Image (cartoon, grey):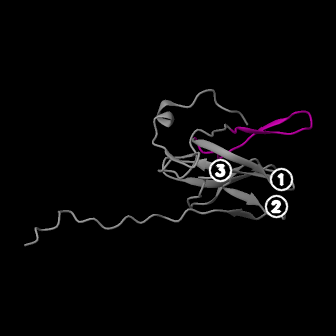
Amino acid sequence: MQQPGLPPIEEVAAPELRLAGLRINPRTNAQPRRLLHITHFQTHRRWHERPITGLPHTRINSVSWSPDGSRIAFAVTYSDRVELWTAALADAKAAPMASMAMNAAYGGTYDWASDSKTIIGSRFPPIVAPHRRKCPFPPVR
């Protein structure tokens, strides 16, 4: 894992909500500017590096190893949501867990269960915008 030097200007200029000391991006429901670059696994034996395939080309954060050390889970931040992904050490392939938006406003998006197969996460319910009329209400007399 590597941390980038400076965030891109579109990330710095993105809108933020400031609530009780937290900064939250209202489009993604996540904390802005918490990024990592994950490109490979590095084993402790002979420091062998294995590239991870299937990684999305976007922002990655909240990386966590499973209790048995066989997989990692990480949050992938897109322009409108945060998804949970995993990668196995055995085959070094990354894949999304589910295509649902995760609640990453408080940083801890998920936790591993002790069986190293189950992940418990906080899902963000889809927001349904209220129906808007195309024209204003007629005048009332």
Category of crowding for the residue at label 1, using alpha-carbon neighbours closer than 10 angstroms: few (below 14), some (14–19), many (at least 20): few
- Contact, CB < 8 Å: mark 1 with mark 2? yes
Of residue 120 and residue 24, the one placed in the foreground of this image is 24
Q: Would you name the residue on which mark 1 appears?
A: 70
Amino acid residing under circle 2: Ser
The residue at 60%/63% (across/down) is 123
- Residue 129 at what x, y percent from top left? 38, 64
Q: Would you name the residue on which mark 3 appears?
A: 107
- Range of the magenta residues? 38-57
- The quadrant of the image that shows the N terminus is top right
> Viewer-nearest of labels 1 and 2?
2
Amino acid residing under circle 3: Gly
* Placement of 71 over or under 44, stated as above or below: below
Q: Secondary structure at mark 3?
A: loop
Category of crowding for the residue at label 2, using alpha-carbon neighbours closer than 10 angstroms: few (below 14), some (14–19), many (at least 20): some
Answer with left or right where residue 64 lies relative to residue 95: right
- The quadrant of the image that shows the C terminus is bottom left
Q: Would you name the residue on which mark 2 appears?
A: 116
**Marks 2 and 3, how far apart in space?**
21 Å
- Residue 14 at what x, y percent from top left? 46, 39
- Residue 114 at what x, y percent from top left? 84, 63
Residue that extends furthest to the bottom in the rendered view of this protein: 141
